Amino acid sequence: MAGFVKGALAGLKVVDLTQMLAGPYCTMLLADQGADVIKIEPIDGDPTRQFGPFRADDEAHHFGAYFQSTNRNKKSVALDLKSEEGKALFRRLAADADIVVENFRAGVMDRLGIGYESLAAENPRLVYAAIRGFGDPRTGASPYTDRPAFDVVAQAMGGAMGITGPDSATPMKIGPGVGDIFPATLAAFGIMAAVHHARQSGQGQFVDVAMYDGVLAMCERIVYQYSYTGKSPVPEGNQHPILCPFGTFPAKDGQVTVGCPRDSFWRELVAIIGRPELATDPRFLTNNDRLAHSTETVAIVEEWTRNHTKAEISTALDGKVPFGPVNTAADIYADPHVLARGMLAEVEHPGSATPVTIASTPIRMTATPGGVARRAPLTGEDTDAMLSGLGLGSAEIADLRARKVVA
């Protein structure tokens, strides 16, 4: 993209074996900040290329929106890792890599003969990261190690679903794939911590994030709540078990959120809604008082919000009380904040006549901003260039392609 400035991770070489969401999101974070991410795909391509939605005029279907979003800024090399020649090429790519990332089930890479210890013997400073449902035995053998897992499994087991929903009898999945995305973000952090250590010591290491563990860490509140009270937290709708008022409220034209984690916000709120006497009412003086009278507190706020539009509430509370409308995707596209922060990135979509929009990086840096510079790659789009870089000639690459060792 015009005006793109390389990110702070420029010069880092990442060999990326990941598929689905958790692994690709992790390596996307690295690519957005300038790392050279080489995505290793099967000969027929990453299966998630077939996940939609697709543009109406895209008859080629090289990939859908699912793949485009989290594989931008990456290169693609297609290898048959079940063949000895394919594994040998992978080893050569990993020999000078800073990072290898995979999210297969535990033991898959070891059985192929290209697991961490094997690669580290040739590249001692290698940082090798794995994102699995229940972790890797190298860092703690879980009784669930061999189970496959996806976002919904991690949300359920890690505690997110157990505190989400309208009531204690109705646990619900959180809309975004937080069971993938949060562990992926933790893995990216762990990778960079390990890279820092490797640069200082010359010693790489194995970085392991279990999706279950990641969601549990995200739900840290339930851990201390159970420790302090002896009770397991349950879904409580759209209010908060510790702060009050703090949740969603009805407006004339939708829903809004209002939060008063500090008593000063409550005093400001009741003045704005024309109930200044509530600022000195002993039932509502402190957060703990309001929590003890949560039904009355919530009713007071609802009585005011339900008689105003989202725009009116925004005007009244702007800059004084934490507030936000419950936005749809269409609302987000129209929000001036999103425009000002450049949070929607346009990229080419092969097979479509017009660009598509994906979420940009929220990480902003003044000297090395990084960002979205390139669409997701076609299957094997960079195979020739990468293999040429390893010293293979065009005839040798053509032979490998004819025998389906590469694509």
Image (cartoon, rainbow, N blue to C red):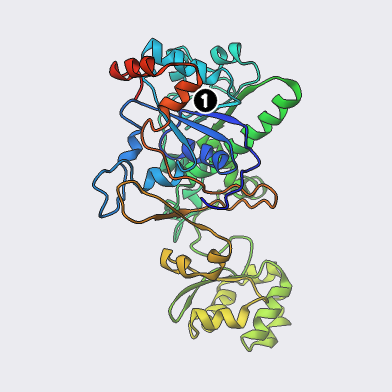
Name the residue furthest front: 394
Q: Residue at x 35, y 56 (%)?
A: 354
Q: Position of residue 314 (x, y in %)?
A: 57, 78
- For the C terminus, give its image quadrant: top left
Q: Position of residue 137 (x, y in %)?
A: 54, 21
Dividing the picture into quadrants, the one containing residue 34 is: top right
Identify whether 180 is placed above or below 339: above
Say if residue 306 shows up in the picture: yes
**Horizontal side, residue 308 vs residue 259: left or right:** left
Foreground pick, 255 / 335: 335
Foreground pick, 274 / 359: 359
**Horizontal side, residue 232 vs residue 66: left or right:** right
Mark 1 Cα shell of 10 Å, populated few (<14), some (14-19), many (≥20): few
Identify whether 392 is placed above or below 61: above
**Horizontal side, residue 311 vs residue 58: left or right:** right
Foreground pick, 239 / 75: 75
Q: Position of residue 320 (x, y in %)?
A: 68, 77
Say if residue 104 shows up in the picture: no
- Look at mark 1 in the image and give the residue it sits on: 142
Q: Position of residue 365 (x, y in %)?
A: 67, 51
Name the residue furthest bottom: 274
Identify whether 266 is placed above or below 53: below
Q: Secondary structure at mark 1?
A: loop
Dividing the picture into quadrants, the one containing residue 227 is: top right
The amino acid type of the residue labelled 1 equals Ser
Identify whether 329 is placed above or below 216: below
Name the residue furthest right: 200
Q: Residue at x 44, y 45 (%)?
A: 375
Q: Residue at x 43, y 47 (%)?
A: 69
Badge count:
1
